[in-house]
Image (cartoon, helix red, strand yellow):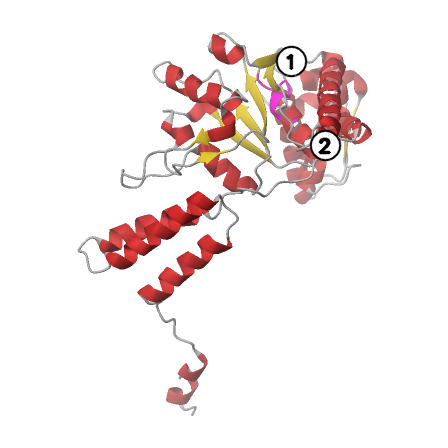
Amino acid sequence: MPDTDKTSAIDNSTITPTVPLTFAEEVVQLQQRISQTDMPDDLKQKAMAMVARLERIQEAENFSVEFDRTAHYIDWITSLPWTARSEDNLDLAKTREVFEKHHYGMQEIKERFLEYVSILKLRASQSNNKVLHAPVLLLVGLAGTGKTTFAYSLADAMNRKLVRIPFGGLSSARDLRGQSRLHMESEPGYIMKSLRKAGVRNPIILVDEIDRVSDSTRGEIMGVLLELLDPEQNIAFSDYYIDYPFNLSEAIFIATANNTEKVATAVLDRLEVIPMPSYTDEEKFHIGKDYLLPKALEESGLDASVITIDDDIWRNVIRPMGFDAGIRTLSRTIQYIVRRVAKLVVEGKLQTIHLTKENVKEYLPT
C-alpha cells in the first residue's frame, strides 16, 4: 500500500516565495525608469520631484492613494515614444506594388496616393531635419468602399506603424485629450494611448468616421480635431492627463467620413478631400474572384481547388439582395458560401464543389 503522506507531499524547498518590494525599493524603481527614459529634461525633473514628494509624505494617511496615482503617471510618461521613430520607405515602386496587391481598380485613388508619397519623398530630400509636414487626406465615401484599407496600405508601403481612432464611439472631447490627474481614475486620451501602442512618434494616425460624432459634443470634438490636424498647433499637443506638450508634427493623419455635411468647416479647410467612388459590378467580379474568395478559402483551411464558381453566376453572388456601393456584402456572401462548403467537407458529403446556375441558390444566404 503506498505511503499517501509521501506521495502527496509537495517539496516546498523548490518554491521561491514572492517577497513584496519595500517602499525604498519601489522608489528606486521609479527613479530608474525616469532616468532611463529619453524624455524632455524638464518633464524628467518634474517626475523626479513627484517621487521625492512621495518620500516626504510616506507617513501621511492618504499616502497609498498618492503613491498609486504617481506611479501610474510615471508609468505613462516613461512609456510614451518621446524620441523613438520608424524609418520611412518612400520607394514609389514599392508603394505601387502594395496598392495593386490590396486594391483592384480605383486607379485615380491609387494615383493620388502615389502623388502623395512622391511629395513626401521630395520634401524629405530637401528637409534638413527630415520632419515631413504631410497634407491631411480625407477619404469620403459610403461604407465598404475601401477608405480604411487605403490607410492601412499606405502604412504598409511607407513602413510606418498605423493606429486607428474611431470617432463613432466618442462621447466627449476628453476621450481624445484625456482628463486631469486631479480626478480619480483619470486616464490619458486616445491620442496618447495610440502613440504608446504604436511605440513611435511618427505613426500614421487614422481618424476614422469623423462625421459620426454626436451632435451634443460635435463642437468640442471638432475643436480638438482641428488642433490635431493643424501643423501650427500639433507641434505641442497637450493631453490633460500627461500635462506636457507632445510634438505630433511627425505623425501622418488620414481621415475618413461617409460624407462631409457634419464635419466642421474649419476642419474641412485643413483637409484634402478625396471622394471614394462606388465599385462597379465588373470591379466586384474581379475583387470577389481574385481577392475575397482566395482569402476566405485560406482562412477557412480549405484548399483553393475546393470551390470553383462559373463566371456567369458571379452576378448572383455580387447582388444576392440588391445593390451595395461597397464590398462588405460581397465579402459576407463569399464567407457564407465558404462556411457552408467547409461544413459539408467535414461531414464527408463532398470534396469539391462547382457552383453553377443550377445549384448556386443552395449556397447563397437567404
Q: In this view, does 193 lie above or below 33?
A: above
Whether residue 190 sits left or right of residue 328 in the image: it is left
Within 10 Å of disc 2 (Cα), the crowding (few <14, some 14-19, many 20+) is many
Instruction: Give the side of residue 268 with respect to residue 286, left or right.
Output: left
Q: Which residue is drawn at 57% across and 14% down?
A: 271
Q: Which residue lies at the image location 63% right of the left edge and 26% below the top edge?
A: 151
| Residue reaching furthest to the right | 93
Look at discs 1 and 2 and give the one toward the viewer.
Answer: 2
Q: Which residues are drawn in magenta?
A: 143-149
Q: In this view, does 235 lie to the left or right of 347?
A: left
Camera-side residue of 205 and 67: 67
Name the disc covering residue 91, or none: none
Q: How far apart are marks 1 and 2 (CA)?
A: 20 Å
- The secondary element bearing badge 2 is classed as helix
Residue occupying image coordinates x 58% and y 30%: 251
Q: Contact, CB < 8 Å: mark 1 with mark 2?
A: no
SS at mark 1 in the image: loop
Whole-percent x, y for residue 71 in the image: 36, 52
Mark 1 — residue? 276
